[in-house]
Image (cartoon, rainbow, N blue to C red):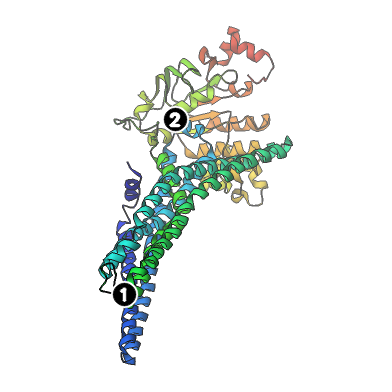
């Protein structure tokens, strides 16, 4: 779909408002045609010594016209900006909603700062194009055409002479503007890269400071910023060319009229003369001065409009990226609710040539707790992510209640699963706000029960604001163990029949972990639970263990059976009484 069609589609809810903007712009233009004609009339009256009252009447008409021009100019600007801001609001929400549909695989391939630049910076730049680009472009077409018609009506020979540069101006501006957009597309990309790097560095500021890398990281930002600066300067040089061409060409029309003066002063009997009245010549010159103004305004806006056009293309490119994890056309909520889990010959890799899981098969019955065990990198966390369809399997099938998870509606599937990730993420806000992410309608009693079960009550009671304590971005004001306990409480509050605990207690001490395990044993009764852990003290409580090595299931059984078997699991455990395995 072409750029202009995308913009037109984007304006589908505000086209009437844009039409009003164009109407007021045309009215403003039409009113601008009248004053030069009245000035011509005044000159004729001066030559014919008209009554004084006629001049006062003419002045009153002029005052009324300029008052109306002021009113129409105001409504012309207001209507276009209202339409632009409404579109900005819709586009921001549409872009955010689209990003929410994208899979983690897409987000992981992008830089977060780059996505932020697209969803905020680029979207905001589109407002400039709608508010100024569309109406000014329309006036840049209408005003020269209208003025040209009037000039031909006044004196067609002089009109031909004075408007000679006009086609060349229009062609030059169009060609240069088209080429300039590519330059501005590059500047928007480089701006996003600078923004992404600064955002990345701010997020990792403690790491930068602890490794004393401030100078080196500042150097990298300086290099990228310099690249952005040079690209901006280059694009700006080309953007200013149309304004210079138009300024020079507008003077060329006047130069041609002055040169034509030698034919104007010739006697009327001369076959080469161009007879014209003084009043008509004055009106002609006034119109000639106005005919290039829309081009000049458009040229002065070129930089902003080209930025906006490049930004719009980047936003459209993002919106055109299709989500890979979507509902199957025949996806349906099962008639009966069963929540046993089954992996059947599941294979998966983040890269096509690098498998993480290979033909993995195991079952977790309703009410059963199964621990996934193995060295780091064998695919334990990946298995959890596949259950909630952050990614889809390459081969095999994962079933929930006997139904392929790909045949379940995504919203239904994820409502049935509560997950505590090893990389705990808390939103900037209060502890209570983060807990209610699990259940927005939770009562105070439900909050208290979840806090108690996760052993969070003790440290929350020590905070002056309690549940109203601000945790900071990503929960930086809480310790690792405190964040994990809040995350567990959030998952418990969701009250889902399937619970995934991925290293959920790795950051808490053993005493706290034991308290959490006892509380979890009560609240998870009857739930399907998968535990990913390295501590023996954690996995001993599981009903069954699934041991992974190089992405394959090598052992399955309870703790005692696997220890007696003397296989991989036993060897890992023998390294230390509570080794990280």
For this orientation, the residue located farthest to the front is 270
The quadrant holding residue 406 is top left
564 in relation to 513, above or below: above
Q: Is residue 492 left or right of residue 309?
A: right
Q: Secondary structure at mark 1?
A: helix
Residue 580 coordinates in the image, percent (x, y): 65, 21
Q: Secondary structure at mark 2?
A: loop
Residue 328 coordinates in the image, percent (x, y): 33, 30
- Please tell me which residue lies in front, 77 or 268: 268
Residue at point 43% right, 44% down? 179
Separation of marks 2 and 1 at Cα, in angstroms: 79 Å
Residue 51 coordinates in the image, percent (x, y): 31, 92
Q: Residues within 10 Å of mark 1 (few under 14, many from 20)?
A: many
Q: Which residue is mark 1?
A: 280
Residue 43 coordinates in the image, percent (x, y): 34, 82
Q: Which residue is mark 2?
A: 388
Residue at point 45% right, 59% down? 248
């Amino acid at each position: 779909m072409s750029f202009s069609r995308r913009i037109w589609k984007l304006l589908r809810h505000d086209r009437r408002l844009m039409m009003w903007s164009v109407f007021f712009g045309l009215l403003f233009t039409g009113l601008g045609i009248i004053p030069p004609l009245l000035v011509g009339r005044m000159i004729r009256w001066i030559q014919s010594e008209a009554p004084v009252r006629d001049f006062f009447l003419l002045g009153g008409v002029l005052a009324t016209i300029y008052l109306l021009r002021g009113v129409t100019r105001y409504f012309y600007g207001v209507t276009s900006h209202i339409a632009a801001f409404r579109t900005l609001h819709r586009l921001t929400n549409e872009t955010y909603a689209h990003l929410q549909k994208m899979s983690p695989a897409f987000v992981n391939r992008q830089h977060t700062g780059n996505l932020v630049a697209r969803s905020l910076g680029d979207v905001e730049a589109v407002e400039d194009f709608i508010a100024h680009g569309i109406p000014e472009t329309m006036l840049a077409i209408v005003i020269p055409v209208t003025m040209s018609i009037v000039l031909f009506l006044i004196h067609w020979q002089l009109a031909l002479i004075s408007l000679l540069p006009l086609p060349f101006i229009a062609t030059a501006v169009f060609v240069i503007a088209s080429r300039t957009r590519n330059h501005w597309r590059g500047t928007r990309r480089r701006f996003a890269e600078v923004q992404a790097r600064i955002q990345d560095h701010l997020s990792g500021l403690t790491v930068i400071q602890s490794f004393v890398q401030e100078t080196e990281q500042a150097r990298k930002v300086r290099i990228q910023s310099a690249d952005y600066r040079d690209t901006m300067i280059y694009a700006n040089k080309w953007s200013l060319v149309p304004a210079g061409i138009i300024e020079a060409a507008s003077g060329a029309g006047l130069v041609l009229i002055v040169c034509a003066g030698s034919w104007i002063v010739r006697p009327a009997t001369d076959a080469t003369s161009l007879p014209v009245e003084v009043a008509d010549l004055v009106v002609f010159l006034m119109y000639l001065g106005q005919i290039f103004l829309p081009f000049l305004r458009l040229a002065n806006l070129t930089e902003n409009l080209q930025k906006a056009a490049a930004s719009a293309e980047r936003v459209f490119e993002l919106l055109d990226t299709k989500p890979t994890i979507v509902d199957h056309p025949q996806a349906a909520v099962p008639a009966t609710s069963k929540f046993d889990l089954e992996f059947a010959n599941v294979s998966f890799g983040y890269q096509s040539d690098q498998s993480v899981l290979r033909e993995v098969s195991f079952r977790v019955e309703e009410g059963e707790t199964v621990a996934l065990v193995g060295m780091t990198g064998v695919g334990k966390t990946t298995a959890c992510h596949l259950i909630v369809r952050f990614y889809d399997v390459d081969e095999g099938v994962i079933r929930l209640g006997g139904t392929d998870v790909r045949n379940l509606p995504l919203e239904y599937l994820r409502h049935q699963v509560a997950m505590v990730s090893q990389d705990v993420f808390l939103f900037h806000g209060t502890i209570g706000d983060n807990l209610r992410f699990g259940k927005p309608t939770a009562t105070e009693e439900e909050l208290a029960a979840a806090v108690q079960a996760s052993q969070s009550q003790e440290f929350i009671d020590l905070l002056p604001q309690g549940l109203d304590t601000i945790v900071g971005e990503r929960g930086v004001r809480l310790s690792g163990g405190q964040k994990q306990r809040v995350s567990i409480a959030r998952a418990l509050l969701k009250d889902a029949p399937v619970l995934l605990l991925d290293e959920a207690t790795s950051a808490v001490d053993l005493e706290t972990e034991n308290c959490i395990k006892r509380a979890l044993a009560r609240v998870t009764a009857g739930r399907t639970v998968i535990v990913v852990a390295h501590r023996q003290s954690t996995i001993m409580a599981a009903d069954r263990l699934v041991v992974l090595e190089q992405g394959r299931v090598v052992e399955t059984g309870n703790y005692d059976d696997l220890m007696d078997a003397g296989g991989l699991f036993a060897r890992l455990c023998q390294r230390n009484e509570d080794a990280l395995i």
